[in-house]
Amino acid sequence: MQNIRAASEITFGTNLNEQAIHVIEFLKTVNDIPELNKSSTLKRAVYRYEKYWLPLAAEYPNEFLAPPLDVEWAWHCHMLNPNAYERDCREIVGSTVKHTMLGARRFYKEQRKSQRYWLEKIGKYQEPFTIDYREPFDTVAIDTYHSKITYDILAASKRQMDLYYQVSLPHYKNRKYLNTSHLRYKQFLYAKAKLPNAFLEPSYDIDLFWHAHQLNPVIYKEDVTRIVGYFLNHGASIDHRTEEDRLNADKQSRDTWLSLYNETMPIFGAMYRGSQPAGLLYKTEKTEYCQSFMQRTKLVFDNVTISMPRIRRAVTLSLWSLADKTRAEHVFSLEYQTISRLQNTTMKWKNVGQYVFETSTDCKMLIMLEAPVGLGLKTVMASNVVNLLPWLENSRNLGNDRHIDVPVSLGHNIRLDLTISIKQLGFDQAMLTLEPGKYRPSSIPRHHKQFLGPIGLQQYPRGSDNYCEVASHRLRNHLGNDVFHVRSIHSRPLMMSVIQVFYQNKMSAIAHIIGSDHLPLPSQVDKDEITLNPLQGERAILLKNNGGDWVL
């Protein structure tokens, strides 16, 4: 408790709770603009940042300027290696350029001022302030530019997107959770001061505050030199270490924290969530997943042609839509007087009727040929029930406005031909039927990621039993066709359940259990956040698709 109390007395030159929230919001903005993570865009951003922005910002040492978004992204990544940032700034402009994280509203306000400074110094024709990431640009000037930046900003940008995924859940911006993380960051710096040679790898809540602090480079150097006693550079990434090194690093960090504070370093909601899943799963296209959806279409009967033997009385041809066994909807009736002397006669009608066909309820149409028998009564000469669903489904690929020709037999020597225009009105609900498979014993292979998919299991625990149970299921659409295959995996040793959805043998969605290492307890937050309380028997499942996390 004495060490925790001493750590809590540490002060900073900026509001790190506020800065941490700004970091998350800025990383979300970058994450939502895919062009900012393309290497070509980043190379141009680094070029613009070094050649134009740093010299401009250095001319206004008492102001916090806001650059174009691509430049801000390059600047952001550069500052996260404080030693390299200070060294490079001194080489490029002679001093460390100051920075702070701004909320969106103030950022765009300061950006307007920065744009005015940019146009005065650089001009819009030499280099525009705001760029269209999709427009071509002079790559030769960039490739031949001699950069003085010694830090790999492109590689750093990928690590920042990985960090964003770890801290993107809502509780990281919760006031109570932020206060706890703020204290833990103070404890982290206190431990660095007390045990300078001890290895200490921060959990993600601490790392978020460490990043927020470094993004105020002048203040950061003053603070950590005062607190730790030396200019603390950001810890080396463990991305390229072996699994053994990762485990040892984690154990050393936990042991150091426990010995100093008599408490565990990991807290609920702040541990590794796995790699960013966006783009890892197959993206099911609309034309593919719409096979599961029933259609809502307008059917227009353009031509109705009947060929039949000659009879000397009037007949009525009628068509009914059969919604179910007990309900029918009248579509049209046609009167036909056979007066031809030929053995066979043909009659043709145009634009006789229309109705809206919904595959969720309307499956078939009843066609009847009736003749009067006197006293206003009719007898059915011939009839047939036609299932239109296969015709409609098979014509999906013909476009939104399409035509089908449907031949119908109405008995001996009576033939009906229907030409129908189909106008797509939309899709109805999806109707999928599960054909369950049986669970069978299996084992999780050493390269578990290929088997389990992107579930956030950093490494398979040493000494753990790799036994699991696996079942394969089928999901069939309203036509009875297999659309998706589903594999469910249950591992008791890992306390893990995974459901994988495949489209044509390509994993397109996944759901898996997540634990309290990803989500906080209700006691850790001060308002209605997504939390998990295992003591109350709660479980949480995360669903992912090609876009990344979809729903929790």
Image (cartoon, helix red, strand yellow):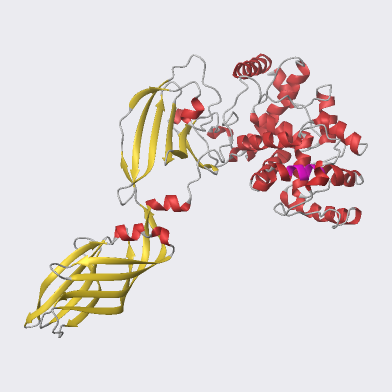
Determine the image quadrant of residue 188.
top right
- 390 vs 183, left or right, is left
Q: Estimate the x, y position of residue 214 in percent, counting from the top left.
A: 78, 33
Q: What stretch is highlighted in magenta?
A: 42-47
Residue situated in front as seen by the camera: 367 or 232: 367
43 is within the stretch colored magenta: yes
Q: Estimate the x, y position of residue 23 in percent, counting from the top left.
A: 70, 40
Q: Estimate the x, y position of residue 510 in percent, counting from the top left.
A: 46, 37
Q: How many labels does the image show?
A: 0
Residue situated in front as seen by the camera: 465 or 259: 465
Instruction: State the predominant SS element of the stretch in magenta.
Output: helix
Q: Is residue 42 visible to the viewer in this orientation of the structure?
A: yes
Residue situated in front as seen by the camera: 171 or 183: 171
> Which residue ends up furthest to the left in the rendered image?
374
Q: In this view, does 477 lie above or below 538?
A: below
Q: In this view, does 539 lie above or below 341?
A: above
Q: Is residue 526 visible to the viewer in this orientation of the structure?
A: no
Determine the image quadrant of residue 413.
bottom left
Name which residue lies at 63% across and 15% down: 248
